[in-house]
Amino acid sequence: MTTVQLKPNERIDQLSAQGVQIIQSSEVFAFSLDAVLLADFVRPNQRQKIKIVDLCAGNGRNRSVFWHHKLGGHFYEIELQERLADMARRSVALNDLTARYEVINDDVANVYRYVAKDRADVVVCNPPYFKNAPASQKNPNRYLAIARHELTIDLAMVCDRMSGLLKMNGRGYLVHRPERLPEILATMTAHRLAPKRIKFVYPKPGMEANIVLIEAIKDGKPNGTRIMPPLIVAGEDGKYGPEVQAMLNGSNI
């Protein structure tokens, strides 16, 4: 591992048994289970010339650092907030992955300046989940507010740029909230993204799903959507189940 300099209120967390390390801070949105679930959901692809784009990459939410062994090729990490992009760059350096990763501090709307249209093989996104409704309560911490609410990007922009970046038959991956699933599927379809796999994630037995994972293929056939077996994160005792534990240990991803 390369030595990197930490800034005030930062720490280094090890996220898997494989030794992946990420710089985090309690002052910004930190790495979450959503990122682990998304990494596990992505299909492996070891071809060395593929291009992977991570929209709304965050800092160590930076899913791609966590799954660099699962996907070959070159990663483009797009992050609007300067502090998070800086943390992501140092996380990449910490894991000796600078040859494969490019962290770009810019708006997702400007992504074509860095990656040409119709050139990406895989696009992933863990976007803000909640609409920017006037009455909705937002965290006073600007970093957390942007991560959770559609203040700087919305679902339509995510799907537009995901579709624009992908090659024909390229794969897009999204993690989101189940209550927005009808809107998500309609927006994907309107942007030439055919949903192919859907997986619901449940926090505990007997509870409603609180996460949905979606794989879509650009210009894919409209039929053939598969609902995958559900995932229950934890048992009644609150401890992670074996499937999630395997993801966290790096044996599934």
Image: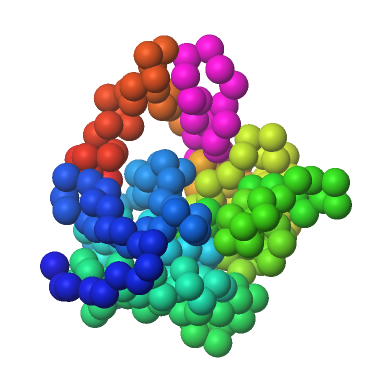
Query: Is residue 210 found left or right of 7 in the rendered image?
Result: right
Query: Is residue 104 found left or right of 16 in the rendered image?
Result: right
Q: Residue, x 58% and y 44% (percent of image)?
A: 176
**Quarter containing the N terminus:** bottom left
Quarter occupied by residue 37: top left
Total residue callouts: 0
Up-down relation of residue 178 to residue 219 (above or below): above
Q: Residue, x 51% and y 76% (percent of image)?
A: 82
Looking at the image, which is closer to me, 132 or 210? 132
Q: At which x and y percent is residue 136?
A: 79, 46
Q: Residue, x 27% and y 58% (percent of image)?
A: 12
Identify the magenta region: 197-212
Q: At which x and y percent is residue 218?
A: 56, 60
Query: Do we see residue 21 in this rendering?
Result: yes
Q: Residue, x 62% and y 51% (percent of image)?
A: 148
Residue farthest to the right? 134
Query: Is residue 245 found left or right of 169 in the rendered image?
Result: left
Quarter occupied by residue 51: bottom left
Looking at the image, which is closer to me, 248 or 114? 248
Q: How is the image coloured?
A: rainbow
Looking at the image, which is closer to me, 209 or 222? 209
Q: At which x and y percent is residue 225?
A: 56, 38
Q: At which x and y percent is residue 198?
A: 53, 37
Residue farthest to the bottom? 113
Query: Do we see residue 50 in this rendering?
Result: no
Q: Is residue 224 magenta?
A: no
